[in-house]
Image (tube, rainbow, N blue to C red):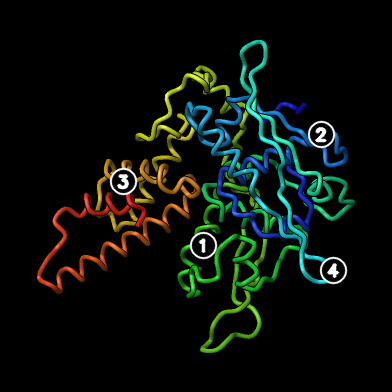
Amino acid sequence: MSKTLDGKNWVVKQNALNEMRTYDMNLQELRLFSVYLSKINPKNKETRAVRFSLAEFQTIMELKSPNIDYFKKIARSLLTKIVFEPLDEGGFDSYTIFNRFRVIQDRGGDWYIDVDANELALPLLFDFKGRYFKYELWNALQLKSKNQLRMYEILKQYEKPGNRILSIEKLKEMLGIKNDEYPRFNTFKQGVLDVCQKALNENTDISFTYEPFGKKGRGGKVIELKFTIFKNENYKDKLFLGELINLDENEPHDIVSSDYKYADDAYISPVYSSVYEERIQHLMSACDDTFSREEIIVIYSLMAQKVPHIHFDEQESYDYLRHKYRELEANDSQLKRRGEKIGNRYAYFKKMIENND
């Protein structure tokens, strides 16, 4: 049903598909989509159904011993990702990318994940006749947030011309960032552009610079950006998914009897332990380093229960905690004006996450 996989596999993506919004996919779902594209043959629609071994799927999705109930949550999320395709006559067509997610055990006792594309989405996935770009899969697997992965694809498409001009509004749309997020250019620059620039330079085969372009808006507001794209000769060693799976081959893969729990790094494969540690440190900074590493780990585990749709995305998790921490600060200020105060800030913050207020 599918070829074996490592980081050298090529992801071939139609330009029109790449120009669309990110379908509200989180980082792991975007990775999975990249792996899916690397497994199909874009010249043969018969390859549309792709099979993942359980070890392969767990590595892509950063899972550790999930059970059937959790796979149902993944299926529900993946099968509701919608493409909005603009029509020449105006308006748009909309449909889901995938129409099947199956968890199955073969006669030998091995577990597999089968994913199949929606019939309506096939023209975007196959036979695009020259209007495409491609990249080696390892580039997508090494990036640590959906903004980074999407920025890579957005710029990789224009690597040959070497530059791309985008309005900030269009760029946000392609990244899947809401219009009211990062309303000031400086915050967008610091929270998205600079972070992506550093990540691509350190982890992929391209790097970029950017600068304001064209006319500015009212009050000198930056409206457009010009990106200059370079071949990156200084990227890190390539990440091969096959090697990562082999490192984890002794992990238990019985998804029926596995205990499913939200504790410490229950979701995180040992392969990604360094990524997990970086994420915890990043989340600590979202709260101005007010809470300890152990306290943030508990908070992060709670997020898996209360906001699972953003839990694995580094930037969304950071933004969520940053927003909650600002609420904490605002509540504390209000109490102080009344001569009161929050006694245990960690317990108060933890309760906010538990209630998802």
Q: Nearer the viewer, mark 4 or mark 2?
A: 4
Which numbered disc flags the more N-terminal residue, 4 or 2? Answer: 2
Label 1: which residue? Answer: 192
Dots 4, 2 in contact, CB < 8 A: no
Q: Secondary structure at mark 1?
A: helix
Up the image or down, 336 lies above or below 74; here it is below
Q: Residues within 10 Å of mark 4 (few under 14, many from 20)?
A: few
Disc 1 packing (10 Å; few <14; some 14–19; many ≥20): some
Report the side of 215 relative to 192 (left or right): right
Disc number for residue 88: 4
Q: Residues within 10 Å of mark 3 (few under 14, many from 20)?
A: many
Q: Position of residue 272 (x, y in %)?
A: 48, 35
Mark nearer the viewer, 4 or 1: 4
Q: Quadrant of the C terminus?
A: bottom left
Residue 258 placement, left or right of 101? left
Point out the tag, 1 or 3, that comes first from the N-terminus: 1
- On residue 47, the disc is 2
> Does residue 224 appear to the left or right of 37 in the view shown?
left
Q: Which residue reaches farthest left?
A: 339
Q: Secondary structure at mark 2?
A: helix
